[in-house]
Image (cartoon, rainbow, N blue to C red):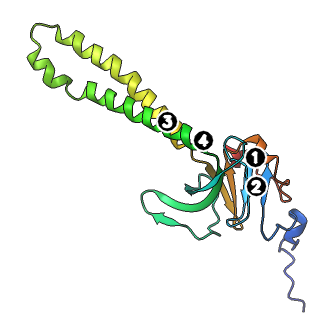
Amino acid sequence: MPDDNPYAPPSVPAVLFEPEWPEQGAFRDGTFLVIKPGSPLPAICFRTGTKAEETLSFALVCRGDDDRSLIPELQSYWSGTFYGVEIPICSDWMRTGRRYLFQARLALTLGFSLLLPTPFLQAFLLSVDRTFYAWCCLLTALPLLTAGHFLQVAGEAKPLLQRIAREYMWIRGADRRFLEQLPEWPGKRISFWQRV
């Protein structure tokens, strides 16, 4: 008597659904950098597309699918799982990032310095309309705090790790000129829902 289950789904090799993935390398999948950690990257800045002078190590948290095929660099209950990757960068991007971070700290410091002493000063400013003073401080501090937040995000400008599958990482944020140096990803393209 045969052991075959007539109700079992047909066994189809996975290679028919998707071509075999390369052992190592860096590729482009639309606007994504697809890389296996340790693979060499072109000496072009990830952000600007100009000549890169150095590489910078990033610890990234995966925002999408993660099959846990990579060993994390750091695992935290509160912050999540961080994976390390080295990206080529240029000195222009580093200078711009430092300038944005300086401007962010300045805006945040000014914003908080307007908000924090307001209740204490109101008690002593008897000759000035206290409500008017509070509104002036609030309306000046809020744009400064908002600008400081956006400048902080722009200054850090971390690449975004979107997906991890079979030891490959899908990273968003690369310049078009950087991606043009890489071959097309031979596997199945990342779906629309994984890109969001």
Residue under the point 28% across and 14% down: 135
Task: State which tag comes first along the sequence, 4 or 3.
Answer: 4
**Where in the figure is residue 149, as x and y percent of width and height?**
44, 34
Q: Which mark is residue 42?
A: 2
Residues at badges 4 and 3 in contact (C-beta under 8 Å)? no
Q: Is residue 2 above or below residue 79?
A: below
The reply, left or right, for residue 194 in relation to residue 146 is right
* Depth check, front residue: 181 or 75: 181
First of labels 2, 4 by sequence position: 2
In front here: 189 or 105?
105
Farthest residue to the bottom: give it: 1
Q: What amino acid does circle 3 point to?
A: Arg
Query: Gap between marks 4 and 1, in whole Å?
Result: 14 Å
- Rendered-image quadrant of the N terminus: bottom right
Q: What residue is drawn where x is 76% and y is 52%?
A: 190
Is residue 74 toward the left or the right of residue 68 in the image? Answer: left
Residue 42 at x, y = what percent?
76, 55
* Residue bearing mark 3: 99
- Whole-angstrom CA distance, mark 2 to mark 3, is 26 Å
Q: CA distance from mark 4 to mark 3?
A: 10 Å
